[in-house]
Amino acid sequence: MPTDLAQRLAQAVLQCVRDSHTAWLAGDTQAALDCLDRALGLNPAQPDALRCQKGMIVLALGDWAQGWPLFELRWKLRGAAWHPAERACAAPRWQGTEPLEGRAILLHNEHGLGDGIMLARLARQLAARGARVLLEVQPALVELMRGLAGVSQVLPTGSAVTGFDFHCPLFSLPAALELRPQAVPDAGGYLRGDPARAAQWRSLLGERRRPRVGLAWSGQAANGNDRWRSIALEALTAALPEGIDYLGLQQQVRDTDVPALQAHPALRHFGPALHSMADTAALCEQVDLVVSVDTSVAHLAGALGKPVWILLPNPPLDFRWMLAGESTPWYDSARLLRQGPDRRWEPVLQRLRGELAAWAE
């Protein structure tokens, strides 16, 4: 192909991708898909990125039958945001059809803490097929996951593991298991806090005199989408009604949020005591309701079966929350409070204030 023609083709594909993103932000998912299909029709040199992007959109629309296989193309997208770090394994990757009876399989988390919490429930599906399941997760999740049904051994990321017949990244399990929105297992909760830690928190917190709400208002600042999902603590505390005891459920408080924390004594912060997600889980079990942005605490609360209100930007940062509605197939106890088309937090926080006051009554 002549160089100038190849350049024009590449520019046309890039414009289609930009148009797709613009349509996605505007809430026009059909136009976003049409732009990606148009780009694919131009016969680009690297179509996998376009197909993977299309997969994430159709997953958000609830078409998991088409979406999960397309999302598997992320393994070919080196350098992209959704390209995971591949784990070196001598054993083959489990594709969903190989018999597991009497076999050992290593499951490993390829993304963040919340992803690991959300997807680890699927280990029980493999154990039910006769597998001995080894689960490798970040060190912060190890203690929490040791009580997970269906898992024989929990290991920290980077362990020298031997003696397994298959391996599978956690985010590849939905495709291998042909997971569908109406059949997500254990949506009612599948994790439990450590009783000893829970007793320690009960003693520290003292007698319960008012309703307790746990709060998580920011995620990892290094996340490329953090500016959309995190909320300034000053804005959140301004929306909190009186008559409720508020507990911080996140380990770190950003420097910019420290003044707001100091100015709101009704919000008790225990960051230095939260050494792992097991500590956070035990504290989470002491509250009546969790209010969280889209971060690992939201997944933890849902996995514990704890009522949780999740504050979501518009559009949501990834496909798991889909595009509309207050419920999610992942967690029965979750309620989704979404931004409107204006993409502003103020209306969401005004609504939160009113509904928290009504809930507390």
Image (tube, rainbow, N blue to C red):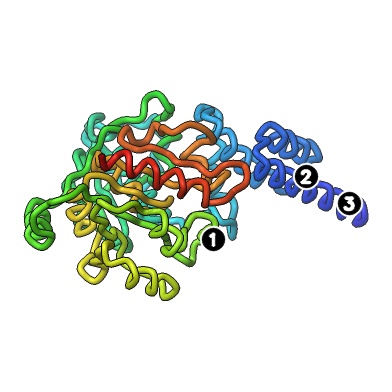
Q: Is residue 13 above or below residue 162?
A: above
Label located before the other in sequence (1 or 2) = 2
- Crowdedness near tag 3: few (<14), some (14–19) or many (≥20) residues, C-alpha within 10 Å: few
**Residue 352 appears at what percent x and percent y?**
41, 45
Circle count: 3
Give the residue number, with chain letter if any, for mark 3. Answer: 8
For numbered disc 2, what is the local secondary structure?
helix
Count neighbours of disc 2 (C-alpha within 10 A) and say few if under 14, some if 14 to 19, many if 20 or more: many
Instruction: Give the residue at mark 2.
Output: 16
31 left or right, relative to 357? right
Residue 139: x and y, percent? Answer: 27, 62
Q: Earlier in the sequence, mark 1 or mark 3?
A: 3
Between residues 187 and 163, which one lies in front from this camera angle? Answer: 187
State yes or no: discs 2 and 3 in contact (Cβ < 8 Å).
no
Residue corresponding to mark 1:
227
Residue 155 position by quadrant = bottom left
Q: In this view of the protein, can residue 213 be seen by the observer?
A: yes
Foreground residue among 163 and 316: 316
Q: Please, what is the three-letter code of the amino acid marked with disc 1?
A: Arg
Kindly identify the residue that appears in the image at 43 percent across and 28 percent down: 181
Going by the numbered disc 2, the residue's amino acid type is: Cys
Name above or below for residue 276 compared with residue 55. below
Answer with mark 2 or mark 3, whichever residue precedes in sequence: 3
Q: CA distance from mark 1 to mark 3?
A: 34 Å
